[in-house]
Amino acid sequence: MTPFVDIAFLILSFFIMATKFKPPEPVKIETPNSVSAEKLKESNAMLITIDNKNRVFLNISSPRDNSKLDRVIENINTRRNLGLTPAQMQNFKNSPIIGVPFTQLKSLLSLPADAQKPETQPGIPVSDSLNNELVWWITETQSAFAGDKGFLYLVKGDNNSKFPAFESVIDALKRNEVFKYNLITAQEGAPEGTELYMLRKQ
Amino acid sequence: MASIDTGGDEGHKKGPGVKKAKKLSTRVDMTPMVDLGFLLITFFIFTATMTTPTTVKLNVPKDTEKKDEEQKIKQSGALTIMLGKENQVYYYEGELDPKGANFKQTTFTGIRDIIINKKKSVIASYVRDPKCEEEKRAEGKPIEDCKTEDFMVIIKPTVDATYKNTVDLLDEMTINQVDRYALVKIADTEKMLIAATEQAAGIK
């Protein structure tokens, strides 16, 4: 029996090390289910999160080339006259998620990454169409990642978030001429007897 | 399970202060450990494959083109679905009757049948369009697609609709293989009708 245990633990260790840990979710989101079978591709992406209190959070991930994030925050700094110090702009890369209006961005970035509490952040203001701050963020991200063909815009909404928040996010994307994006959902099987079910059975 | 074999005890005399160390052989049964090991492996196998989230691709048309798109679709093939609060679904076919005669209500489970029936009726009332068939042949698509050329679903969520409602309805589009659909802002007349219906049914 002992060799059995040895092999079992070897395989177990392999799986533990081979699988990557999910990046910890700073804001708890319960995504709706969808029958869509398209998997999320690994690429640079801008993740817009809408939680159940209709707060909008932002997270730009560029795992292989972090320098583009520098350009984003520098341009935001100049465009909106935020007066961020270089240290604060560096901290932008380490922040798990941004969910504050521009006025509070300076104070958020002066905190170290683990002290920034996403739960207490008020969310990026989007509801006022004249002052939809998400538009600025998307503009700068778009220009920083201009050459990146696989760049994805992801929207991760909570089940209970109301439509106006989602509509404002779509509006912000439209104003930046972004017409293709992905909604993150959980997998669900095609209901039996429907056309999709028949299509997939073939 | 585990057993400890201490060896014969009987032949031991109680000598003055002489105590021989008994040879103990311990044998622990490994089977439960193997079970645990494999359970953990199975757990990791399953969670590893489940971590890739799925996505729903959403393409929206440019705002400037929307007005033209709305006028191009035939009223006979249009199905407008509105999402109200508390998972209520309202719909009407074609154009909204000024008195609200064709304004109907259903739930998320009922809407699938509505969509399927509408799609069937559009296919049934299809009049052969040679121009469309030529286009499809040129594009390499099946001619069957021409039958549903006129079928369009317009999704209008209200302020009280949740994100889940919207995604569920977009899912219904995929489930029922609806090729043409659009997310549109709700009109005031529709808002009033929905408010009236909600009041009549008791404020939900």
Image (tube, coloured by chain):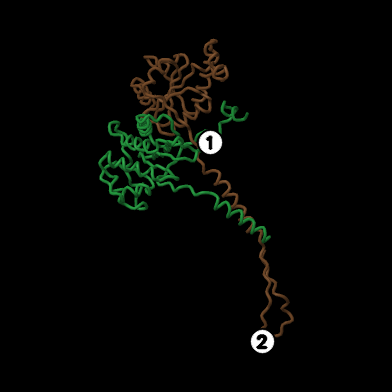
Instruction: Establish if A86 lies above or below B89.
Output: below
Please name the amino acid that badge 1 sits on: Glu
Q: Which chain is green?
A: A
Helix, strand or loop status at disc 2: loop
Name the residue that disc number 1 marks: A188
Find residue A121 and report its horizontal and vertical position in percent.
33, 45
Find residue A181 and report its horizontal and vertical position in percent.
43, 33
Say which residue appears at 35% left-offset and 41% top-offset: A72
Which of the chains bears the disc numbered 2?
A: B
**The C terminus of chain A sits in image quarter:** top right
Name the residue that disc number 2 marks: B18
Find residue A17 and report its horizontal and vertical position in percent.
54, 53
Q: Are marks 2 and 1 on the same chain?
A: no
Instruction: Establish if B118 lies above or below A97.
Output: above
**Label 2: few (<14), some or many (≥20) within 10 Å?**
few
Which of the chains bears the disc numbered 1?
A: A
**Which residue is more in the foreground, A192 or B184?**
B184
Say which residue appears at 47% left-offset and 20% top-offset: B152
Instruction: Establish if A84 lies above or below B122.
Output: below
In which quadrant of the rendered view does residue B97 lie? Answer: top left
Compared across the picture, whether A36 is left or right of A48 comes to right
Q: Colour of chain B?
A: brown
**Which residue is more in the foreground, A156 or B16?**
A156
- Mark 2 touches mark 1? (CB < 8 Å): no
Compared across the picture, whether B35 is left or right of B185 comes to right
In space, the residues marked 2 and 1 are separated at their CA atoms by: 74 Å
Please name the amino acid that badge 2 sits on: Val
Helix, strand or loop status at disc 1: loop
**The N terminus of chain A sits in image quarter:** bottom right
